[in-house]
Amino acid sequence: MRKTFFCIDSHACGNSVRVVVGGGPLLPHLPVAERRALFVRDHDWIRTALMFEPRCHDVMSGAIFYPPWRDDCDVAVVFIEVSGCLPMCGAGTICLSTVLIEEGLVTPRVPGRLSLETPGGRVDVDYRMDGDKVAEVRPFNVASYLHAADLTVELERVRQLVVDIAYGGNFYAVIEPQQNWVDLDMSASDIVEFSQKLRAALAELIEPVHPEDDRIRGVHHAIWCDVPKGDADGRGAVFFGEKAIDRSPGGTGTSARMSQVHGKGRLAVGGRYRNESLIGTVFDGRVEEE
């Protein structure tokens, strides 16, 4: 039926992800970055219908999967979210992989590893089964890097902020404790307000462009960082969309944070980084040299 979609709802550390397993638009068999552009041009109403109220909420992510274009991938994916169609999404990758494996929708060529063709590049996902359930998912993200360091931004209410711009599948403004912003012990509404103003100010100051794909550009996300309270190396709150605080630590945000601290000489290549979100969950990641 037209305008009818079969979806499986899932979550990664509390962040909701709606996986569209039936009814997605037919797209030409092209590299998924090009299919993403066609989806944005012709089918964005599907994203808004499935991500926003009354069928969803302000903190929603999703994924639609397709046959891969690349010979070294098992499946291609178009990520949909309240903030748009992303080049890469960590929570979307974890949930999509879990759904595909548990529901038998894809048979990986290599047992225990699923290779995704994302608009941002190939992402390998190692998974471990416990019976018929996926017990553990570990994605190896696209190449991430520090794009710009120590930018001074004029922001209402907090005067000046010094931020870094890092890429982890999406471009992030990375904010660390400083004179005009002390820590994360503040309300979620304040984080949202500051993030909206910061994003608007950055849009007038810088437009980062990915060196290999000029369709990936602009700072749409922010990660506010702090010292951890639990058993982790860092604490953070990821902002996206218009008023969303990620309920999970954030996959692309964690990668951006790792590349930022590595780019500033504070994390060795191959080192581990455990990122604690505001709700206390922990995401393990690794930074790999290109």
Image (spheres, helix red, strand yellow):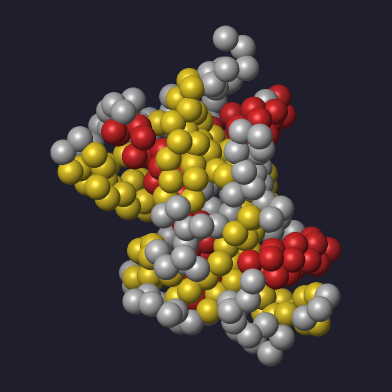
Image position, residue 228 (x, y; %): 44, 79
Residue at figure coordinates x 60%, y 59% from the top left: 245
In the image, is residue 4 above or below residue 239? above
Visible residue check, residue 86: no
Residue at figure coordinates x 57%, y 9% from the top left: 1
Q: Is residue 88 left or right of residue 55?
A: left
Residue situated in front as seen by the camera: 62 or 86: 62
Q: Can you name the residue that lies furthest to the left here? A: 131
Q: Is residue 190 left or right of residue 142?
A: right
Q: Is residue 82 left or right of residue 236?
A: right
Residue situated in front as seen by the camera: 54 or 181: 54
Image position, residue 220 (x, y; %): 68, 56
The image quadrant that residue 130 belongs to is top left
Image position, residue 289 (x, y; %): 40, 64
Q: Can you name the residue that lies furthest to the top here? A: 1
Residue situated in front as seen by the camera: 154 or 164: 154
Residue at figure coordinates x 43%, y 80% from the top left: 229
In the image, is residue 189 above or below residue 12? below
Residue situated in front as seen by the camera: 37 or 228: 228
Q: How many marks?
A: 0
Image position, residue 276 (x, y; %): 43, 69
Image quadrant holding the C terminus, namely bottom left
Visible residue check, residue 57: yes
Q: Is residue 49 left or right of residue 156?
A: left
The image quadrant that residue 269 belongs to is bottom left
Residue at figure coordinates x 59%, y 71% from the top left: 224
